[in-house]
Image: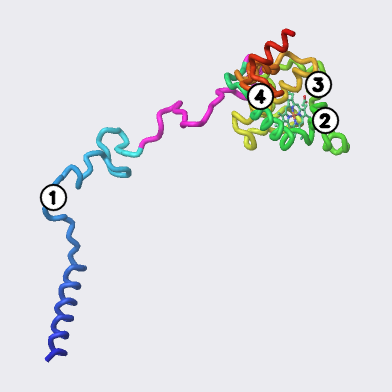
Amino acid sequence: MNKFKSIVVVSLGLAVGLASCDSGNIRRTPGHIYAPDMVYSRAYDAYTANPNFADSQTSRLPVTGTEARGHMYDHLQEGDTNAYKTYTTDLRFNADQLKEGKRLFNIYCAICHGPNLDGQGPLYASGKFAAMPANFKDPKYLHMPVGQMYAAAKYGKNMMGSYASQLDIKQRWTVIAYIKKIQSENGGDAFAFGDASMAAPKTGAKTDSVATDGKTPAMAANSDKK
Ligand code: HEC
């Protein structure tokens, strides 16, 4: 009798289970709806037809000129050498960023321009590269407009290829800021791409909270007066 009962229970369960699949006639209506505007989206779903646009597509391309967040655009045109000369950046760099500029320079540029920026990179010095890379310490390049340098990194120059795919816009400027920093120490123009931390006076002993010899700033200032 027990066995019979369990057979009935199992077959009933199977019947209910199979019926709920309703494979032949899939139901599209969800039954009673409590909040219809949550069940049916009021917005046009992606890939559905949209009567508001001539091409009736809901998925739209970004408006022309849209700039993606975190991305930069330079609007420079290849070959517009007049624009190169006046082109510049608002970016400013601190000591760490200039170190990054040096790192990038040594990876991408030093093979030709030399780790000392003198145009004597190992590739050129070995005699395997015919054209002399720019010697950034030469007066010819010391005062070169930054935009022209930027254009060289972006588009290349004669025998030098483009580095646009290796360096994004900010990285290109970081490398150029590094070159300009070294140039400023070798007879070039005063370095103009340092941020506020670079402009701060370097001999700040009196403004330090603790002077190096352990005296308070006031004590250090007094002892300075003698
Ligand atoms: C494969 C060798 C090579 C590499 C790598 C290279 N350059 Fe050059 N670069 C040259 C040569 C050669 C010239 C000289 C082109 C000329 O004036 O004919 C040059 C010229 C330049 C100039 C002067 C442009 C001008 O208008 O006269 C700049 C600025 C410059 N390079 C920056 C860079 C930077 C920044 C990098 C790294 C991202 C780099 N180069 C990597 C070979 C190279």
In the rendered image, which quarter is residue 59 located in?
top left
Residue range of the region highlighted in magenta in the rendering: 60-86
Q: Is mark 4 within 8 Å of ligand 1?
A: no
Disc 4 + disc 2, Cβ < 8 Å: no
Q: Amino acid at mark 2?
A: Ala
Q: Earlier in the sequence, mark 4 or mark 1?
A: 1
Q: Is mark 2 within 8 Å of ligand 1?
A: yes
CA–CA distance in space, label 3 to label 2: 17 Å
Q: Amino acid at mark 1?
A: Ile
Choose mark 1 or mark 2, whichever is in front.
Answer: 1
- The quarter of the image holding the C terminus is top right
Specify whether residue 131 is in view. yes
Specify whether residue 82 is in view. no
Location of mark 3 (residue)? 137
CA–CA distance in space, label 1 to label 2: 76 Å
Marker count (numbered): 4
Closer-to-camera residue (57/222) = 222
Location of mark 2 (residue)? 131
Q: Amino acid at mark 3?
A: Lys
Q: Amino acid at mark 4?
A: Tyr
Q: Which mark is residue 33?
A: 1
Q: Earlier in the sequence, mark 3 or mark 2?
A: 2
**What crowding class fits label 4: few (fewer than 14 Cα within 10 Å), some (14-19), or many (20 or more)?**
many
